[in-house]
Image (cartoon, grey):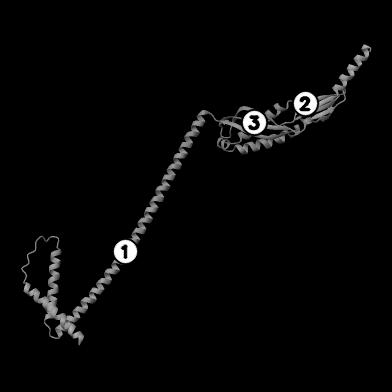
């Protein structure tokens, strides 16, 4: 076999091999014919026309994470903070990502950093620290809309860290401490107020119960005095009838009663230390005997 045939056979094999393209999973290749885009090769085995066609760009179709470097941002209330984050994006159109923008990652990074400063610059420091989710959502909407012509989909944007200056952090710490102390004082005052209200309610209930007790006691005392008065009235009537019938012993009854009551009151005196009683015991006994006879007469009159 001549050398010419061998060379021709080798060239043919090389040309055929040039037309065989194997695309890996998660990748897509763009095909250019004489420098012009003609199509996209999907994962798997594909064939192109050697010499006429060539691989233009090899595009990674998997989701990619892009770090946003730390940068300084001035908030609406003129606080200087350092902010960094991450961007998650995925190519959905290989041709657009290859031919609509040059250096795709750099373009996404610059676009994200610019909008990050714009969004955060319109917020105060307190809003910046408390509304991360809203910031992430707003940034995602803006960046995703801006990168749509490049054939990519921004899936997430996350703010990783917000670092205020040290003096500002110390000031915020003092402010938080003051707020906690304020809340503690308010809670203590509320507790004191509620305790005072409860004490007042208790004293009120106690006063009501005491008043009701005094009222009941007064009613009982009044009832007892009424019964005592009725008894005395009955006794007086009985004595009066006895006197009217000529029974002198009735007079002795009253004398003896008043005598005994006077001695009892004298004995109750706090200044009385010793009592001398030159009493005529026979008179007292006679009075008591008169009372007995008076009672017996009353009983005899009642049985008639």
Q: Are marks 3 and 2 in contact (CB under 8 Å)?
A: no
At 53% from the left and 29% from the top, the residue drawn is 165
Q: Are marks 2 and 1 in contact (CB under 8 Å)?
A: no
Looking at the image, the residue that sits furthest to the top is 3
Which residue occupies the foreground of this view, 254 or 201? 254
**Is 4 placed above or below 59 here?**
above
Q: Which residue is mark 3?
A: 86
Q: Is residue 211 visible?
A: yes
User: What separation in Å lies between label 2 and label 1 (alpha carbons)?
Assistant: 100 Å
Quadrant housing the N terminus: top right
Reading the chain from its start, which is encountered first: label 3 or label 2?
2
Q: Residues within 10 Å of mark 1 (few under 14, many from 20)?
A: few
Q: Can you tell which mark lies on residue 3?
A: none
Q: Which residue is mark 2?
A: 58
Q: Which type of secondary structure does the marked residue at label 3 adopt?
A: strand
Question: Picture coordinates of residue 63 (x, y %)?
Answer: 70, 32
Q: Which residue is mark 1?
A: 213
User: What separation in Å lies between label 3 and label 1 (alpha carbons)?
Assistant: 79 Å
Mark closer to the observer (3, 2):
2
């Amino acid at each position: 076999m001549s050398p010419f045939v061998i060379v021709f056979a080798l060239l043919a094999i090389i040309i055929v091999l040039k037309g065989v393209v194997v695309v890996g999973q998660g990748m897509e290749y763009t095909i250019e014919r004489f420098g012009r885009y003609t199509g996209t090769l999907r994962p798997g085995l594909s064939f192109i026309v050697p010499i006429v066609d060539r691989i233009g760009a090899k595009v990674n179709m998997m989701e990619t994470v892009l770090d946003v470097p730390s940068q300084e941002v001035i908030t609406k209330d003129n606080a200087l903070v350092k902010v960094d984050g991450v961007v998650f994006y995925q190519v959905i159109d290989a041709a657009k990502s290859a031919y609509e923008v040059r250096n795709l990652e750099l373009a996404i990074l610059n676009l994200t950093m610019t909008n990050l400063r714009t969004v955060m610059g319109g917020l105060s420091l307190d809003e910046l620290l408390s509304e991360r989710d809203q910031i992430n959502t707003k940034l995602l909407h803006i960046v995703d809309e801006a990168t749509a012509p490049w054939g990519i989909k921004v899936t997430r944007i996350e703010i990783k860290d917000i670092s205020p200056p040290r003096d500002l952090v110390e000031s915020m710490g003092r402010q938080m401490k003051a707020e906690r102390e304020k809340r503690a004082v308010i809670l203590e005052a509320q507790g004191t107020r509620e305790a005072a209200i409860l004490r007042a309610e208790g004293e009120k209930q106690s006063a009501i119960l005491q008043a009701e007790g005094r009222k009941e006691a007064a009613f009982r005392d009044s009832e007892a005095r009424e019964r005592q008065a009725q008894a005395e009235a009955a006794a007086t009537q009985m004595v009066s009838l006895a006197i009217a019938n000529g029974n002198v012993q009735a007079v002795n009854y009253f004398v003896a009663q008043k005598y005994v009551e006077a001695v009892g009151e004298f004995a109750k005196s706090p200044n009385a230390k010793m009592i001398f009683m030159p009493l005529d015991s026979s008179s007292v006994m006679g009075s008591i005997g008169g009372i007995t006879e008076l009672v017996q007469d009353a009983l005899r009159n009642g049985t008639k």
